[in-house]
Image (cartoon, rainbow, N blue to C red):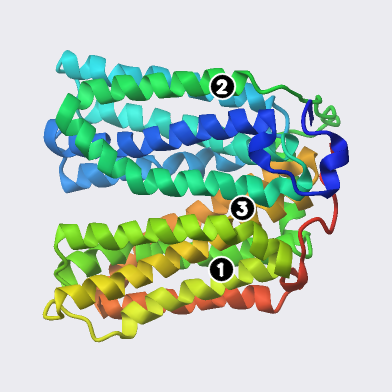
Amino acid sequence: MRPESPDPSDEGRRTEVLRIPAFRLFWTATTIRAFGSSIANVAFQVLIVTVVAATPFQIGILSALGVAPYLFLGFIIGALMDRWNRQRTLVLTSIGRAVVLAAVPILLLLDRLEFWSLAVIMLTLGVLTLFAHSAEQPFVPQIVPRASLVSANARLGQSETVAGTAGPAAGGALLTLVGAPLIFVFEAVIHAVSAILQSRIRVTESAPAPRAAGRHIGHDIAEGMRFTYRHKTLRPLALSVHVWFLGNSIVATVFAVFALRELGMPAWAYGIAVAFGGVGGFLGAIIAPAVGERIGAGRAILIGRSLTVVPWLLLAVAPLSNATNIVLLVVVVSIAQFLFGLAMGIEDANEISYRQAIAPDAIQGRMNATIRTTNRIVFFFGALGAGVLATWLGYSVSLGIAAAVFAVAALVIVFSPLRNARHGEGEPSAR
């Protein structure tokens, strides 16, 4: 693939990515869709509880449907993304999501929205989102120079963080003002606009090499796994992020219950603490390019991994309870969330950019799918185990175990060649 811009001569120097027409269109489409998704998530939660009146078991099923496509289709779709036109995939998935979201207000107006129809909608959106995510990561290196990948991913991370922080509040307000049907009409329009913007990106995608006789998609998937887990720096990167997802599955399952039930934080206080996580993530994404350029990709990722240990260790050992002064409680939990967001902001942009730069284009889809799908398999089973862990050992001990798991993720990098990796070194992407 080769975009009409930027000029290939820019390959060795960092470019302000929003000046690149192709990336500007991609970033705009991604940003408005991120805000829309954050608003839609709130609306879906309200529909599940109020309109569908789902039982706890049904809520669990609906939540699992968001992850299920990765478990069953992640590797396959990743392999397809090395043979399909990625831009066309992005456009079609945006159109598909617009159509699916437009069905929600129709079902609401006809009073036909019930558990099974909502389950079909959630599963369909999950599959379409999986296709879109599988196309996005290998597409970015084709519309920006290698030297600007960290900046590009940092911009995308900033948008995701702001959307994740402001979107739920906006969703709650819009839900009150205009109601669920109009919100989903708005969501459908956002995805339609996103499709138009994506279709305007000017990039030429080369056809993949013909598959050799006797080979099938299973061979393609195996090749992607071999490339990922035999590569001297991608292997420790993949193993480290898998371990990180195990730790994250614990905190994602335990933290909200710990804060709201164990510490007795009121909803407004919990909301403030979570918002500080968004602030930290935004700041981390801002400084990520400078950190990666100054100390190298490997050490930037290591800083993020190491910093992740601190907030959960703090919450595990701090003498907090529902009798703690509310101001002190908000301060401590907010600091923990800020540090967690900061760590993710620093490491995400550097990690994704390094993966995009180190892998040839012909295997980008499979390499990303290998890592992303395994991450979600680890998260799925880790979340199930985290519930048992919290029941047996309590919330504080569970958070302490999560901190230890995050420490292991950092140690994987410390004792590997990835520690000294820098952006721009290693095998260049095939273009």
What kind of residue is marked 2?
A: Leu
Name the residue that disc number 3 marks. Answer: 371
Q: Which of marks 3 and 2 is nearer the N terminus?
A: 2
Name the residue that disc number 2 marks. Answer: 197
Name the residue that disc number 1 marks. Answer: 304
Quarter of the image where the C terminus is located = top right
Few, some or many residues within 10 Å of mark 2 (<14, 14–19, 20+):
some
At x 55%, y 44%, the residue is: 156
Report whether 392 appears left or right of 380.
left
Residue 235 visible within the image: no
Q: Which of marks 1 and 3 is nearer the N terminus?
A: 1
Q: Earlier in the sequence, mark 2 or mark 1?
A: 2
Few, some or many residues within 10 Å of mark 1 (<14, 14–19, 20+):
many
Measure the C-alpha gap from mark 1 to mark 3: 18 Å
Measure the C-alpha gap from mark 2 to mark 1: 33 Å
Residue 199 in the image: state x and y as whole percent: 61, 18
Report whether 175 appears left or right of 410.
left
Residue 16 in the image: state x and y as whole percent: 69, 43
How many numbered marks are there? 3
